[in-house]
Image: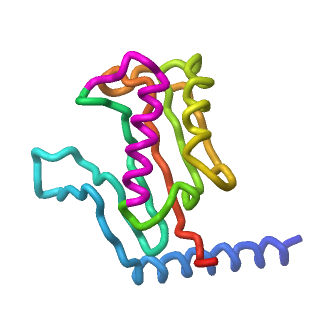
Amino acid sequence: MREIKTLALIMIGMLFVGCAVADDDDARAYFGGRSASDENAPPFSGAVLANDTLYVSGVLGLIDGKVPDDPADEARAVMDAIKAQVEGAGMTMDDVVFVQIFCSDVSHYAAFNAVYRTYFTREYPARAFLGAGTLLFNARFEVLATAVKRPAE
């Protein structure tokens, strides 16, 4: 049993070393990037591309700065914003591997799903749909996503 634990610890250590080395070689691109030196800018970038992985910050589905009256319109606006970030990085929505949805009221689950389904043509990404209470600007949805560029087929 002690040998298995030792082997497991060695393997975990090798993973951490591999991750540390990979981080040194990361090529990064910022979309909607903001600098920590700009005190007037919100403290986040819209998306960060690290090698072939895109991390999209939480996005709201505002239209002209306001939450639409219809939950489906808001879901469409938020998914359009995610799609724009993904395509801006040279990917498609089918490159998205994980989506996290924060929802102010889970009774909007079906309305969100009806819109969400239309953005993918292949397998759906892994996903979490979380009841979150009040969101910024009283939005119903805030969505973040991770995409990994698929190899050329």
Q: Say which quarter of the image contains residue 2.
A: bottom right
How many numbered marks are there? 0
State the residue at coordinates (58%, 17%).
107
Left or right, 72 with reference to 114: left
Left or right, 113 with reference to 23: right
The one nearer the camera, 47 or 132, is: 47
**Residue 39, position in %: x, y?**
11, 48
- Residue 122 higher or lower than 102, as above or below: below
Q: Which residues are magenta?
A: 66-87
24 magenta-colored: no
- Residue 49 higher or lower than 11, as above or below: above
Q: Main secondary structure of the magenta part?
A: helix
Quadrant containing the N terminus in the rendered view: bottom right
Colour basis: rainbow
- Residue 141 higher or lower than 97, as above or below: above
State the residue at coordinates (56%, 38%).
116
**Residue 23, position in %: x, y?**
43, 76
Quadrant containing the C terminus in the rendered view: bottom right
The one nearer the camera, 74 or 99, is: 74
State the residue at coordinates (44%, 24%).
140
**Residue 25, position in %: x, y?**
41, 83
Left or right, 126 with reference to 54: right
